[in-house]
Image (spheres, rainbow, N blue to C red):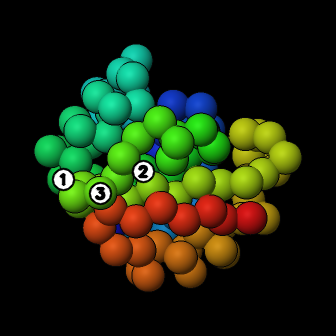
Amino acid sequence: MKILLDEWLPADLRKHVVGHDCQTVPHAGLGGKTNGELLALAERSGWHVLLTMDRGMPYQQNLAGRTISLAIIRAKSNRLPDLLPHVPAILAALPTLRSGEMIHIG
């Protein structure tokens, strides 16, 4: 599965999302985009899931009809030590996501 890490997540998190093609938004060439642009471009580029901490995104973006899914991490901060305890839940949730679905993790 192709997983895209939002700009505010640490790049080293990708090393812990094992078994998936995981890249950061900047590395994928999608940095600096608005949420709507990011979702559309990521979807066209074949990404399956956007992993983010942006809790406002579900209220700003309509996922109906989209092929990309949204996984929102609820962690204390976006620091790697605060995100690592959520990795098992992230890895467990990824295979269950359907196109256009949004889930909260943590």
- In the rendered view, would you say 11 is above or below 72? above
Q: Which residue is mark 1?
A: 46
* Mark 2 Cα-neighbour bin, 10 Å: few <14, some 14–19, many ≥20: many
* Mark 1 Cα-neighbour bin, 10 Å: few <14, some 14–19, many ≥20: few
Residue at 41%, 41% in the rendered image: 61
- In the rendered view, would you say 78 is above or below 95? above
The kind of residue tagged 2 is Leu
Q: Quadrant of residue 100?
A: bottom left
Task: Work out whether residue 15 can be spotted.
Answer: no
Q: Earlier in the sequence, mark 3 or mark 1?
A: 1
Q: Which label lies toward us, 3 or 2? A: 3
- Where residue 74 appears, as percent x and y from the top left, is 73, 54
> Disc 3 and disc 2: Cα gap in Å?
15 Å
Q: Is residue 101 left or right of residue 45?
A: right
Q: Which residue is mark 3?
A: 64
The kind of residue tagged 3 is Ala
The kind of residue tagged 1 is Gly
Q: Which residue is mark 2?
A: 50
Label 1 element class: loop
- Where residue 87 appears, as percent x and y from the top left, is 66, 66
Residue at 23%, 38% in the rendered image: 40
